Amino acid sequence: MFRKLTLLGTLTALVAANAPAQDKADHVAIIVNKSSGLDNVTLSDLQKYLKAEKTKDPSGSKVVLTQREPGPERDAVLREVYKMSDGELSRYFLQATFTGAVAAAPKQIGPSAVNKKFVADTAGAIGFVRASEADNSVKVLKVDGKAPGEAGYPIVIPK
């Protein structure tokens, strides 16, 4: 009996270890300027950064938020990180700006290439792109210890 349980445990571990990684094209990478002190964030902390509740990264740099044009990447971030609709997010930042809770709403940035360049050129910038579009000009954050493409990565574009 013990031998069967040991074999079952070993097989389960092998299957889990060899499970295929998810396709990076289906994940949204959270990107930051290379000088950022951020490397790995919890989903909860990421939400606080993107909602401007946390305004400095661990290195002390002021966080500069970017927001993508409408599309599947933005929809995934709205659903998985903000947990809001587009309209709710607009109202959140309008109210937070009006009350002084935040200095400004995220900078509206166009397509991925423009967003990536802005993040690469701006200390403290945080943005997002489709994971397959991220390159070495920016740092890609792990979320809850998972990198885009790894099983269990939380910001996924639905198929």
Image (cartoon, grey):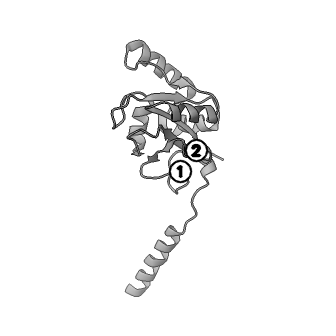
Q: Secondary structure at mark 2?
A: loop
- The spot of residue 51 in percent (x, y) is 43, 29
- The spot of residue 26 in percent (x, y) is 62, 48
How crowded pointer 1 is (Cα within 10 Å; few <14, some 14-19, many 20+) is rated as: many
Marks 1 and 2 in Cβ contact (< 8 Å): yes
The answer to which of 45 and 87 lies nearer the viewer is 45
Q: Is the residue 2 above or below the residue 121 in the image?
A: below
Q: Please state, as top left, top right, bottom left or bottom right, where the N terminus lies in the image.
A: bottom left
Q: Nearer the viewer, mark 1 or mark 2?
A: 2
Which residue position is annotated with label 1? 148
- The spot of residue 80 in percent (x, y) is 51, 40
Which residue position is annotated with label 2? 134
The answer to which of 109 and 18 lies nearer the viewer is 109
The residue lying at 48 percent from left, 21 percent from top is 105
Tag 2: amino acid: Ala
The circle drawn on residue 90 is none
Q: Secondary structure at mark 1?
A: loop
The residue lying at 58 percent from left, 39 percent from top is 129
